[in-house]
Amino acid sequence: MDFAGVRGFVKVKPTVLVATTTNWFSTARLALALSNAGCIVKAVCPPRHPVGKTTAVSQLHVYNGLAPLASFADAIAAAKPDLIVPSDDLATRHLHELFRQQKRHGKAGASFCALVERSLGAPESFPIVYARTAFIKLAQEEGIRAPKSEVITNIDELRRWIAQTGLPTVLKANDTSGGGGVRIVRTLEEAERAFQALGAPPSLARTTKHALLDGDSTLVWPMLLRRRSVVNGQVFIPGREATSLVACWKGTVLASLHFEVLNKQDSTGPASVLRRIEDADMSRAAEKVVRRLNLSGLHGFDFMLEAGTGDAHLIEINPRATQVGHLTLGPGHDLPAALCAAMSGSLVHEAMKLTENDTIALFPQEWTRNPESVFLQSGYHDVPWEEPELIRACLRRSWKWRSWRSRRKSIRAFAEVHRARL
């Protein structure tokens, strides 16, 4: 691919390419926030992605899961971005692989490599952010409180791990996201079943469903190549889940958001209700990792707040934007504005604070989970009212597998909560 037109650092209105391989609504929200912060926003995404329902994106490029690297490369060459912001783990891995390819081309690939480094950070960090056990060991080297973690390659090693650390324990597969590769197991039999499932290549049924019903072909090659995942054991920390997202630039944190998780879409899935918190341990952990790995862009961190003590234990990194990236919550907590300023070399122009309510119910996540949830009224319900087409797309997607009676109940509940706006 010809990357000759990919730009270096510029002091003009920056162009951001939002890159995704999934149909998550949070990507559309992030695109809106980046546009509001003063960026020109373009996107590479699967067909019929919700980002196409927003007014934020000036240029759309189609992601093809059967030719993933080529579709990303074509989009980057056409968009000529100043920064690439991946919003899922597979998108980040594609960028890392393209970086390795272009690095082999020497001077011909230099501009592309510089773009990826500017977007994600030092290439030395690339192998670490995928490898759950290696990342935890790095965190411990930095003096960060983090649970013991170990790669498990077979059932005998799994049994030894459980004998040493006890039950419950946590099993996590590398190269997964959104909670899809995490199992909390409480018996040896459950652990053995989970280990086999997490390490196995995607099944034909799962791959077909994703491709035909969701328009997601990312599992086709892993299924055909029978690609197995590395499984890790991690000591279980009883307590409350918490999450952070930071905007960083060349190893320095520019802005941050920290939340306690109040509700989730399912037991190991992403959060649907969050409470904003300030936690010194979480802040220090993020700053130490960002500095050690010399990171740039948006990076998420997941924690457990230990029961009884409240001590924060870092349990993993998300090397991409997470679903809270669009939330603008005041000075030092507006990540899109911080990134835009870093790219353009200007002062940070933060957006108006979204809400004074520390409890935030994400839309459509919490409404989809329970349309009568008390959090939709007691918290700030994060509905993008300025983007009616995006709201309609959210509602249609949420209704897809519901009965007509369930749809009517959901509509009534939504109308009751937001009667003033409707």
Image: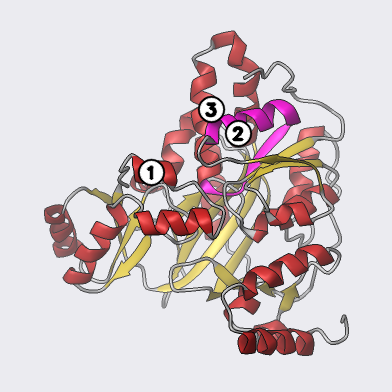
Three-letter amino acid code at the position of disc 1: Pro
User: Quick check: is 80 in the magenta stretch?
Assistant: yes
Range drawn in magenta: 68-89
Query: Which sits earlier in the primary sequence, circle 2 or circle 1?
Result: 2
User: Quick check: is 125 in the magenta stretch?
Assistant: no
Three-letter amino acid code at the position of disc 2: Ser
Q: Tag on residue 71?
A: 2
Which residue carries the number 3 mark? 98
Three-letter amino acid code at the position of disc 3: Leu
Dot 2 surroundings within 10 Å: few (below 14), some, or many (20 or more)? some
Residue 323 x, y percent position in the rendering: 63, 59
- The reply to whether residue 279 is visible in this rendering is yes
Residue 270 x, y percent position in the rendering: 53, 66
Real-space Cα distance between discs 2 and 3? Answer: 11 Å
Q: Tag on residue 354?
A: none
Q: Residue at x 65, y 28 (%)?
A: 74
411 versus 319 height, above or below: below
Which residue carries the number 1 mark? 222
113 versus 85 height, above or below: above
Dot 1 surroundings within 10 Å: few (below 14), some, or many (20 or more)? some
- Disc 3 to disc 1: CB gap under 8 Å: no
Residue 111 x, y percent position in the rendering: 66, 18
